[in-house]
Each structure stands twice: as structure tokens, then as C-alpha cells.
Image: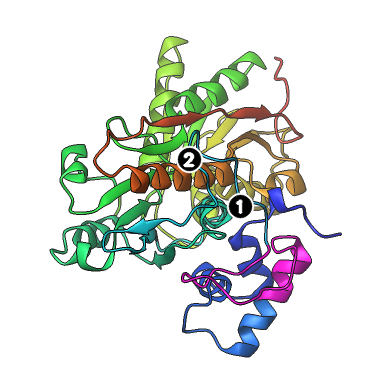
Amino acid sequence: MAQTESNVAMADIAAAAGVAVSTVSRALSGAPGVSAQKREEILAIARRLGYLTAPATASTSAGLAAGGPPPARPVSGVPLDSRWLGPGARPARITAVVPESDRWVFGSILAGIHDVLGPLDVSLRVKQGLSDSTRAAFLADPHLADEIDLVILVPAPRDIPVQALKELPVAVVIAGTVVEGVASVGIDDIAVGHMATNYLRNVGLTSIAYAGFLDHEGTYGVATRRRGVGYRQAMEKAGLRPRFVQAPYSSKPGRAATELLLASEELPQGVICSSDEIAADMIATFRQVGVDIPGDISVIGVDGHPVASMMGLTTIAQPAREQGQRAAELALQILAAPSGPSPAPVTLPTRLVVRGSTRRFSV
């Protein structure tokens, strides 16, 4: 049975087609670099999964595929079906910049951006494969404004000060991270850390670890770090000792984190993973060596990834696709009034989804 459009992201299409998310994005946008045969194959998969509800047709100036999920609700006071023109009476040029990872949450955010901007006369491009350091170099390019009117960063860069973002020659919107003082959309990641920790405490656990993965530059991303902050605060408030497991950068950080736990003197009663993908790998690795989930250890993730329901994973679900939609709306607000005040950051709600990977602990 085909997935509903609310559950399908470009990452899902990429997995089904055996290609990168960037290839899916190019196929859906009509950008060069994808053969006609591969493009038709990707479009067929997108229709089968419910991402596209009608055959793709000739594009707007952006080349974005027709059909697909309907655009998000209109920006207050600004009709989304109008023609958005940048300086010099031409379609506004928007570039979405995402990391090298093909993570589900980033693909979902990109899908949300397409939902809103797809029907409009804007030039939308996706630039993928940039680490934080190379994103900083990209944004520092003195000729950036010659080609781009607005950049949507997915998610927030780690080491670029807010003031530096404000001083860029192009407008900036951040999707996937709330940044005070910048037009941005995300969730309260510190609150997510609190929510996951307090849930495990409330079912009787006192020994709780936090597993986050280091990126290829050897540091935590913003969301992973903030969730860890919330975890630490909740543990210390309860008088419990935090225990961090830092998985090294790899294609399977969940497996790496599990191996670190298995090599330790004692397993915790529960583990909070910074993403559902890490949690899914962790559960699979534990089961391979005979560790029962949740009998021996409880595992909770973050994101609301489709794999969570498949594996019975308790998770903190976030509205990833809506973050992309709202970020695109903020971009349109800025383009409509470039000299106006920056839109306020938007924080979207999360929810706890309890499944079979956690249990009440009793002594």
C-alpha cells in the first residue's frame, strides 16, 4: 500500500530508487544531471509512494514538477499564488543548502519546501554535500548575491554567529533549528531532551544514557547538542548522573554507539538516542547479540521517522515536513518585503509516541 503524502519525503523516494536525495531533488525540479530514463523512474516511484499525485508536466521557471502534495496554508495576508519577483523583475532565486547526510529529517524538510515553492514562479535549487565549514565558505562568497536572493539553511550552521548571518548579502531562513534573531523554524530541542529523559524517569529508570553521533568534523550538530543539554539538565535536576555515549562519525553511528555500550562495565537501563536512525541501528545491534529490547534495556529516539513505527520504537516525533513548509513561507514573506523586519522564529510542537521499545522498570 502506498504511503500517504504526509509520511513520504524525498529520502524515501531516494531509498526506493537507490539514488541520493540530491538526485531525487534534481529529477523533481527538472534540473540537469539526471538522465531522462532515471528521471522517469524517479517520478514513477514518487507517484507510487504518493509524493506526486499527478504526472509531472512542463515546469515553471524553476522546473519544479507539477502535481505533488498541495502547498501549505497561505502566509497571513500574502497570497501564495502570486508571482514572486526578485530584484530586476525576474523570478526570485532561492537556494536550499543541506548537509552531505541523506537523513530522513532533511529530506522531509526539503519536501516541505517544495510543497510551498513548487507551484510558484521562483527559481529553487538544492545545494547538497556541504559540511558546516564548507557552508561557511559558501556563504562568505563575495559573489553570492549575484546568483542568489535568499538561502534556506537546513539546519542551522554550528559556528556562524547570528550577527554574521544578518550581515550576509542575501536573505537567510533557517529550517530545522530555532535561532533567536533570525527567521527560522524548528523545534525546542532542549525541551525534547527533557521530555525523553523525564519519560524514562517516570517509568522507573534511574540509569539513563544519551547517545549522539559526532559528525565528520568530530563535533555534535546543533540539534544533537541541544538535546544533550536538555538530557543533562533533566538528569541533574533529578540528582542522577548523566552518561554520554559519543558515537564516532560512520555510516552506522547507532551500531558504533551500541558497541561502546556493550564494551562498558554495565549497561544503562535506558538509552536516549539523538535520532530514530541511531535508535533503529542500536536496537538491531543489541538484538544481534541477544540483548532484549525492552526487557534488558529501553531505547527511545527522536524524529518520528517511518522506521520508528516499523520497529516499535518509542520516539519524540517532530513535524519535519511542516518545518520546510513554514520555512518556505518565511522566505516568501521576506521576498515580499525585503526591507521589512525579519520574521520571528517559529517553534513547532513535538509529541511523545510510546511504543514497545520502552517499558516500566521495577526492582
Q: CA distance from mark 2 to mark 1?
A: 44 Å
Q: Nearer the viewer, residue 28 or 225?
A: 28
In the image, residue 310 sits, relative to residue 36, either above or below, namely: above
Q: What amino acid type is highlighted by mark number 2?
A: Val
Q: Which residues are magenta?
A: 43-67
Q: Of 78 and 247, which appears nearest the observer?
A: 78
Q: Is residue 181 left or right of residue 21?
A: left
Residue behind mark 1: 281
- Is 47 included in the stretch rendered in magenta? yes
Quadrant position of residue 87: bottom left
Disc number placed over residue 360 in the picture, else none: none
Q: Which image quarter is the N terminus in?
A: bottom right
Give the camera-side residue of 20 and 275.
20
Which residue matches tag 2? Answer: 78
The image position of residue 39, as x and y in percent, is: 62, 81
How far from the left and from the top, in percent, is residue 3?
Answer: 78, 55
| Amino acid type for the residue under numbered disc 1 | Asp
Q: Nearer the viewer, residue 128 or 63?
A: 63
